[in-house]
Amino acid sequence: MGINKVKIGKKVPEFDLESTGEKTVKLSQLKGKNIIIYFYPKDSTPGCTIEAQNFRDNIRKFSSLNTLILGVSRDTIISHEKFKKNQKLPFDLLSDYDEKLCKIFDVMKEKNMYGKKFIGIERSTFLIDKKGVLRNEWRKVKVKEHVNDVLQTIKKLK
């Protein structure tokens, strides 16, 4: 049986992942809120730090739109807790060390850094509505204006 991959306009498959704050986050427990799941390559790297700070700095706007933010990478919970504390992130980070959620969202891609090819997380963001339906996806994200694009899209959901 293949992996159920997400599609815009379809319900996102149930998942549960270990989270910062000694929790397990389950999609079914988040119904009634919009959810932003953003996948990023690695804790405490320059682009990932800026992206996390941009979500952090706009948390009130997201909250006013009934939207929860979750960051996901393959880093350990210990690494996530340190990153969350250092950046004062007001949202949880999920550890997808076995790439279960990465595969559902199809974010594992071949990358090339300094001439070396490897498989890693392609920076991507997904908007899930209050009923658990995928409403939008941003792939190959450029960090600069990304959070504003996400906020504009959520506003159009109302």
Image: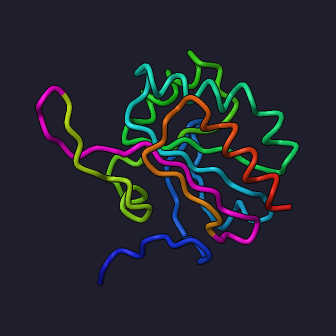
**Which of 67 and 27 lies nearest the eye of the viewer?**
67
Q: Residue shown at 61%/67% (left/top)?
A: 134
Residue reaching furthest to the top? 86
First to last magenta residue range: 114-133
Q: Where residue 26 appears, x then y in whole percent?
A: 60, 60
**Which of 70 and 134 lies nearest the eye of the viewer?**
134
**Which of 89 and 118 lies nearest the eye of the viewer?**
118
Q: Residue shown at 64%/50% (left/top)?
A: 36
Query: Is 53 left, or right, of 3 in this rendering?
Result: right
What kind of colouring is applied to the model shown? Answer: rainbow
Residue 118 lies within the magenta run: yes
Q: Is residue 148 above or below residue 47?
A: below
Residue 10 picture quarter: bottom right
Q: Where residue 142 appears, x then y in whole percent?
A: 49, 36
**Which of 87 and 49 lies nearest the eye of the viewer?**
49
Query: Is 23 left, or right, of 119 in this rendering?
Result: right
Query: Is 114 left, or right, of 87 in this rendering?
Result: left
Residue 102 picture quarter: bottom left
Q: Residue shown at 66%/32% (left/top)?
A: 55
Q: Where residue 47 appears, x then y in whole percent?
A: 45, 25
Quarter of the picture containing the N terminus is bottom left
Residue 107 lies within the magenta run: no
Q: Where residue 92 appears, x then y in whole percent?
A: 61, 39
